[in-house]
Amino acid sequence: MSSEPDIARVHAIIRGKDWPTALAAVCGQFPGAAVFSTSFGLEDQAILHALAQAGLALRVVTLDTGRLFEETHALHAQTRKRYGISIDVFFPEPAALRRLIAERGPNGFYDSLENRRECCRVRKVEPLTLALAGAKLWITGIRREQSEERAQLAPIEWDEQHGLLKYHPLLDVSETELRRFVTLHDVPYNPLHDKGYPSIGCAPCTRAVAPGEPARRGRWWWEDDAKKECGLHVQNGRLVRRKESDS
Ligand code: SF4
């Protein structure tokens, strides 16, 4: 299935607009078919606020891996109340989780890259596939500044694995701009961000970074930087790259 016409159309829609305006305009092109996946990071909270302000009632999903920080659960509860929305939670498949722990142990992800990827597959990648089923547009909170790999992405791309368009409305937004937006609009956010955690995932696989250290350095810190993706944004082992023809 070719997505080139849709990609060109979305590029034309977002060109010259600020990100909240572009986000609303793009979502308006996919009525009933857009999904926003949140892990309650700073980026996701800003996007959720923009969606709520625009009155866009699209489906919001999240993955509960079973290993999240308590602060993340508290923010989920706070966010529901603040915006009056229900967030659809997807969990690991029980039989797959039982097998994972029986075969590799509860913290087997520290033992090998293969174990870590299998844990992410069971707890994140497979639930995400269910969460995205039937959608035509997937909205994410990815920003270029987050890693060298992410710096190469295009704002809109075709996701072959899930068979939909993937849109990163904050791709070119800096952390400074993002924090300004969150402060200006009093958006609720995870208190761990103020304790040195720029990127927050599962508790056993996330730690604080030193000032000035790359954001992804706090995720899976025992691995090479080049391998630090959980599989949610990877196709055939790589992040989807910008095409020469993309703007
Ligand atoms: S981030 Fe860690 S605990 Fe969470 S799914 Fe991946 S390996 Fe498992």
Image (cartoon, rainbow, N blue to C red):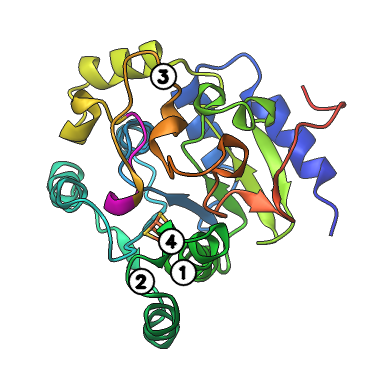
Query: Which residue is at the front of the view, 113 or 9?
Result: 113
Magenta region includes residue 153: no
| Separation (CA) of disc 4 from disc 1 | 18 Å
Q: What is the CA distance from the residue labelled 1 to the residue labelled 3?
A: 31 Å
Distance in Å between CA atoms under marks 1 and 2: 6 Å
Q: Amino acid at mark 2?
A: Phe
Evaluate if marks 2 and 4 touch, with contact meaning CB atoms under 8 Å apart.
no
Amino acid type of the residue that numbered disc 3 sits on in the rendered structure: Glu
Alpha carbon distance from label 2 to label 4:
18 Å
Judge whether residue 202 can be spotted in this image: no
Residue 213: mark:
3
Whether the residues at callouts 4 and 3 have beta carbons within 8 Å, the answer is: no
Q: Residue at x 45, y 62 (%)?
A: 124
Disc 1 and disc 2 in contact, CB within 8 angstroms: yes
Q: Nearer the viewer, residue 19 or 128?
A: 128
Precedes in sequence: disc 2 or disc 3: 2
- Residue 202 is one of the magenta-drawn residues: yes
Q: Secondary structure at mark 1?
A: helix
Identify residue for label 2: 91
Of marks 1 and 3, which one's residue comes earlier in the chain?
Answer: 1
Work out whether mark 2 precedes mark 4 in sequence or the reverse, and give the earlier one.
2
Determine whether the residue tagged by mark 4 lies in a helix, strand or loop.
helix
- Judged from the image, the secondary structure of the residue bearing numbered disc 3 is loop
> What's the mark number on residue 207?
none
Badge 1 amino acid: Pro
Is the shortest distance between ligand 1 and the CB of mark 4 under 8 Å?
yes
Task: Say which mark, if any, is on residue 127.
Answer: 1
Q: Which mark is residue 109?
A: 4
34 to 225, vertically: above or below = below
Q: Which residues are magenta?
A: 198-204
> Which mark is first along the chain, 3 or 4?
4
Left or right position of 228 against 156: left
